[in-house]
Every structure is written in C-alpha cells, then in structure tokens.
Image (cartoon, rainbow, N blue to C red):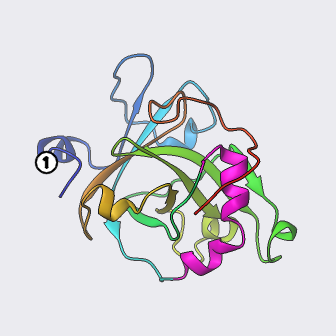
Amino acid sequence: MSLLPQADAAVNPHTRMRTAGYLDIGVPPILSAGLYWVIVVLVGRVTGGFGQASGNLAAVAALVCRRMGLPRYHPGTLNVRLNAPYFVEPEAEIAAAEYHGWERLLLRRCCIGGVRGVIVRPETHHTGNGHGPACLEILAEVHLRTALALADNDIVEVTTGGVLPCWPDPPRDQAACGS
C-alpha cells in the first residue's frame, strides 16, 4: 500500500518543501534542512535493511527516546530509500562514548503516515558506509510496516523540519522510555 497518490509521486518523485502553505520548489533538502521553519517532505520507497537495527539500537533506544521526547519505541527501524542523498541536520545527537563507542548518531524528528518517528543516522552513513546518505532509518513508537500496512517498494512521504503535526511538543529530555 502506498501512502502517496500515484499521480503525486509521478509529478515530483524526489522531494518537496513546504513553508507556511504549500510550496513546490526544486531546492535539494541539504540546502535548507537546518532552517527550523522549513518543512522538508522526502519521498522514497520502503526497503529491507540489514536486519541489525533491533540489536544495534537496543543500547541507545532509551537515549533516543529521552533526547527526542518519544515516549516509547518499537525495536528496529523502517528503511526508506530516497532517490537522492539527504544529509541529516540533527536536532540531537548521541556520542559514541554514550553507548558502544563505534560512531555518533544523528537524530531528527519526522512524521510518516501521521505517525511520529525519529530519523536515526549513523555518522558514517553520510560518507557512504552502511545504507549511505540516500536511506533513512526511522525509529517509531509502533512497528511502522504493520501500522501503515507497508511492504517493500511502497512509496512513502517522510516529513521533517519545522513544526510537525504528529509531534505536538518540541524534543525534550524525558525520564523514561519503554519498548
């Protein structure tokens, strides 16, 4: 099941940005991702991953929740393959020393299908390691494939930046996070 009308995906298969109203401009998200008032809409396809996110994120998921204000998390991530690289401008970070010492994690709030999530980007993915910069790994409160009835190759929109409707509150440190 695609979360996008097919006509919309055909018009602009890469990205759209919205400001106060609706504005379709062809500016790559890397140029404006750091501007809080700009909402970036990334369009991509659901894809499988390496199957390691559940284990790798177990040590840091509670930190992700606390830093981003997510009350709980579902183990694992949803991977979304974009047609172009997206370099995450983090709202929060987790230093390598805070979990297993491998690399820094960049965190950014997002919405997918009305569900709040967190883009979790290992720093080395910006340079092409792992999934690379054209793949988003999204941690959420629910199993996104089930909640949104998604399958591999479904087209989805991931919205980030600005004031997001699925995130009523800004990120903040929380005392607890359950899975």
- Going by the picture, which residue comes out furthest to the left? 7
Image x and y of residue 12, in percent: 25, 43
Above or below, comparing residue 176 to residue 19 in the picture: below
In this rendered view, identify the residue nearer to me: 176 or 81: 176
- Residue type for callout 1: Gln
User: Which residue appears at 49% of the width and 59% of the height?
Assistant: 138
Residue 27: image quadrant is top left
Q: Is residue 18 left or right of residue 65?
A: left
Magenta part of the chain: 52-71
Q: Main secondary structure of the magenta part?
A: helix
Q: Residue furthest right?
A: 97
Residue for badge 1: 6
The quarter of the displayed image where residue 64 is located: bottom right
In the displayed structure, 164 sits above or below 60; it is: above
- Secondary element at image label 1: helix
121 up-or-down from 159: above or below: below
Image quadrant holding the C terminus, namely bottom right
> Nearest the camera: 176 or 40?
176
The N terminus is located in which quarter? bottom left
Residue 82 appears in view? no
Whole-percent x, y for residue 80 in the image: 40, 62
Q: Is residue 157 magenta?
A: no
Mark 1 neighbour class, 10 Å CA radius: few under 14, some 14 to 19, many 20 or more? few
**Where is residue 148 drawn, in percent x and y?**
29, 55
The answer to whether one can see residue 17 in this image is yes
Q: Residue 132: percent from the left, percent from the top? A: 53, 70
At x 60%, y 30%, the residue is 169
